[in-house]
Image: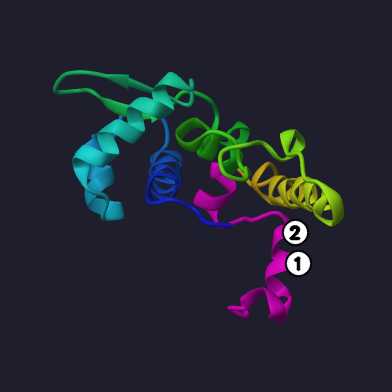
Amino acid sequence: MRLSAKADYALRASVELAAAGDGPVKAEAIARKQSIPLRFLEHILLDLKHAGLVSSQRGAEGGYWLAQPPAEITLADVIRAVEGPLANVRGVRPEELDYAGSATPLREVFVALRASIRAVLEEVTVADVASGGLPDRVRELVADSDAWSPH
């Protein structure tokens, strides 16, 4: 799986907002703490706002905060808000692929891959990451030494 800089930054900004609690957080503070270019971050926060994940207020007392409890926002929600579907092939959803001949089973492989990605990203919330309390299933996957192998 490849994660774009936009999705990476959106995840980091969401976790930063979860860690900050209830009050508004300035985009500048998020950008500084997470080393995210401010202009890029502002566009990302707008995408998250349009998806209903972030709220904002303008002015001296303004800033951004999560629009939902952080325990209810999954990493999948954040990625979908800025990138769209979690898995696709050339911009096509796996279930819509149509392969011929001996390549026909590839469609099922890509559907299974998407299910695997969902199994992690739909289970982990921004609250989990902010608190460092990842779900047991994720910790089990990370404990496997093959998970850390770059192949």
Asked whether residue 40 appears in the rendered view, the answer is yes
Query: Which kind of residue does numbered mark 1 sit on?
Result: Glu
Find the magenta span and give its range: 126-151
Question: Under tag 2, what secondary structure?
Answer: helix
- Provide residue 90's location: percent of width, then percent of height: 57, 44
Mark number, residue 140: 1
Mark number, residue 4: none
| Crowd tier of the residue under label 2, counting other residues whose Cα lies within 10 Å: few below 14, some 14–19, many 20 or above | few
| Viewer-nearest residue: 119 or 29 | 119
Separation (CA) of disc 1 from disc 2: 6 Å
Query: Which kind of residue does numbered mark 2 sit on?
Result: Asp
- Provide residue 68's location: percent of width, then percent of height: 53, 25
| Crowd tier of the residue under label 1, counting other residues whose Cα lies within 10 Å: few below 14, some 14–19, many 20 or above | few
Indicate yes or no whether the magenta region holds residue 133: yes
Residue sitting at 38 percent across and 41 percent down?
Answer: 20
Q: Is residue 56 above or below residue 116?
A: above
Taken as a whole, is the magenta stretch helix, strand or loop?
helix
List the single residue furthest toward the left. 60
Mark number, residue 136: 2
Residue sitting at 68 percent across and 41 percent down?
Answer: 122
Q: Is residue 131 above or below residue 144?
A: above
- Provide residue 128's location: percent of width, then percent of height: 59, 48
